[in-house]
Amino acid sequence: MTGQNFERALTRASLSTSFDPDRLIENEPTRFTATVVYARQLDPGPKIDVAYANDAELNPLDPRQFDVTPTSSTRQYLDDGQPDGKGGLMLVWTWDVIPRAVGLLTLTLEIKPVVMVGGVVSTELARRNKPIRIDVVINPNHAKFDELVGRSDKDFTLSVQDSWKAEEPATIAASFVLQDASPDVSLRLDLNPADGSVPLTIVAKPPGPNPPPNTVFAEWEVTPGKEGDVRLKAAVIIATQSGDRALEQRIEKPVAKVADPAPSFWGPIQSIIAGLSGLIGLVVAVAGLAKIFPSQWKWVRRKLRLSESGPTPPTPPTP
């Protein structure tokens, strides 16, 4: 095919593009439309060459920055053009576009006239590229989410009991100051054992009648199963929905304590045993005296009986 034949195969057309909605927000879908108008006086603005058949593609400069899904046929034919309302015809391509980043980003619209030579698509025609620069703003929920995550160092605090003993409950409290945080962002407090810890039983305490104002608050009773190192991970989980994507961030703070041995029950037992031993010794001693001094022992027993029933007997004789 000669250059003149190429020229006859091409038609000059106007190109316009638009987004709906035109303000792009991170993770929020928008519809991108590319319109080619021909067969009348061309509009001001970008011009391209089109052939009987034309392919269109929309691609992000960085694939991580956009999700792009065609919603119309990739190939459009001039014979299928629809009236544009101004005496001409138009071809329309559409895509669903979801930004995955923020800032000034770039999409590239590529329209390629398809010219067949001997039944094969000619590669001699250069692609018509149109860079589309878009300023994508951060999703409002993402902005609020980032704010809370950034404040977690100072607004996420723990209160931990100083003294710990095995088999006795100790108290841990966690709080996060909201500072008028958005209701679209949720916060949850969590406590779990960490590696290297003695066995732990963790029980969440019910909220009190007067929780701290403007604060997410939680309290737990933690019981070490035995003496040794107590290792815990307290966490605040911050979550929100940014468009079609769920965002979640877990911020952890470690807790390290040492549980002393549990109080021994042998102390009280030994005191009881010591008391019983003294009593047994006294009984044994009295029994021994009764054998050594039988007459005196009889006198003592008689005195005890008389003291209950009558006057005191006379002094016993000297042995």
Image (tube, grey):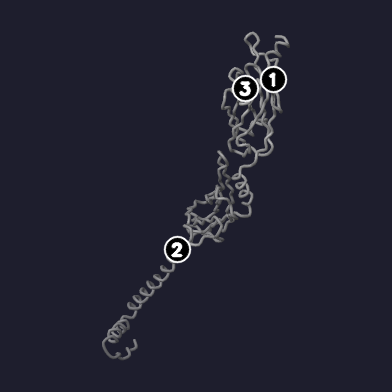
Q: Identify the residue at image location x=67%, y=38%.
A: 135
Disc 2 residue type (three-letter): Trp
Q: Which residue is mark 3?
A: 89
Q: Which residue corresponds to mark 1?
A: 12
| Residue 244 location, quadrant | top right
Q: Secondary structure at mark 3?
A: strand
- Marks 2 and 3, Cα distance to the nearest angstrom? 100 Å
Rendering coords of residue 38 (x, y %): 65, 21
Dot in front, 3 or 1: 3
- Choose mark 2 or mark 3, whichever is in front: 3
- Secondary structure beneath disc 2? helix
Residue 64, compared with residue 172, is above or below; it is above
Q: Is residue 6 above or below residue 188?
A: above
The C terminus sits in image quarter: bottom left
Answer left or right for 191 relative to 56. left
Residue type at mark 1: give it.
Arg
Q: In the displayed structure, does residue 309 sit left or right of residue 197?
A: left
| Mark 2 crowdedness (10 Å alpha carbons): few <14, some 14-19, many ≥20 | few
Q: Which residue of the protein is positioned furthest toward the front in this rendering?
A: 87
Q: Which residue is mark 2?
A: 266
Q: Amino acid at mark 3?
A: Leu
Number of numbered discs = 3
Residue 209: image location, x then y, percent: 48, 62
Determine the CA span between mark 3 and mark 1.
12 Å
Q: Earlier in the sequence, mark 2 or mark 3?
A: 3
At label 1, counting other C-alpha atoms closer than 10 Å, the crowd grade (few under 14, some 14-19, many 20 or more) is some
Give the class, few, some or many, for how many residues have Cα within 10 Å of label 3's Cα (few <14, many ≥20).
some
